Amino acid sequence: MKKEIFSGANLLPIRFSIETEKLFKKALDTFSAETLNLYREQTITSTKLGIQSRRLNNWDDKKIIVDTRDGAKSGWRRFSVFEWAHVEIVRVLREELDLATGPLANLRKSMEEKVYSGLTLLEVAFILTRGKTNGNIYLLINREGKSNISRKRDIIPMTAGMKSLELHIEINLNQLWKAKFGANIWDESVFMLNQDEIDLLKYADDPIIKKRIAEIEEVQYGSES
């Protein structure tokens, strides 16, 4: 017997096996709330993304990505881990697969839809790729930009006879994000600290922390120049 776990107006109708449902729920229910908050903090500069500001502005204008600047659309962009992960999906779909901007704007709507315990589909997907789900997590997108996630073993029987999934695109999110983030995304070259946080940590007696802060400052100032 299969059932839908993640559903919504902008999502593809996907039914999962009982095994997949149990694995997904265990990974999500045991995920640390503290880590979730860190993932949501907008601390990553656009320089780290490796994408030109002009291109980010274009994607923002077309409602493909979230505008992380202030209301005046000025100043530095700051991305959360989740937002960065979404930008990577957009980059592949737009630059490598040449997907039109209309479906990409709809994809953003589906990725922002809350599907499980206050988590968006994007957040759920990212958390599952870092958890133990016995297989890679795939993002499925149809021609309209509606999407959902699945394990590979659930895709073939799930798509059989379903017109809404004709010509759908599959992206292996584990491979995509591992190539970008690596095994450990929590390092000083990824996250930017504000000056108050840096000043506070400078008072630590631990020489290792002091060394790390010096490295962070060097990376941060180099990125902002």
Image (cartoon, rainbow, N blue to C red):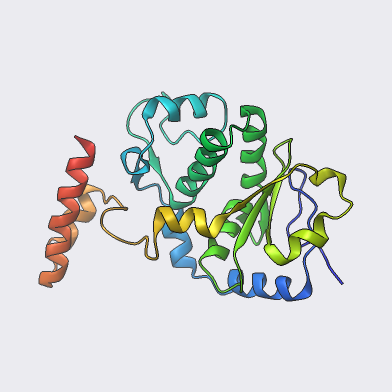
Image point (50%, 53%), residue name? 176
Q: Position of residue 160 (x, y in %)?
A: 85, 55
Image point (31%, 53%), residue name? 191
Task: Say whether residue 221 is left or right of residue 63.
Answer: left
Q: Quadrant of the N terminus?
A: bottom right
Residue in front for this viewpoint, 38 or 126: 126
Q: Position of residue 135 (x, y in %)?
A: 61, 69
Up the image or down, 142 lies above or below 211; here it is above
Which quarter of the picture shows residue 112?
top right
Which quarter of the picture shows residue 200?
bottom left
Residue in front for this viewpoint, 152 or 9: 152
Figure label count: 0
Q: Quadrant of the C terminus?
A: top left
- Any part of residue 19 in sight: yes
Q: Position of residue 158 (x, y in %)?
A: 81, 59
Up the image or down, 88 lies above or below 178; here it is above
Q: Position of residue 203 (x, y in %)?
A: 12, 64
Task: Say whether residue 170 is left or right of residue 85.
Answer: right
- Any part of residue 203 in sight: no
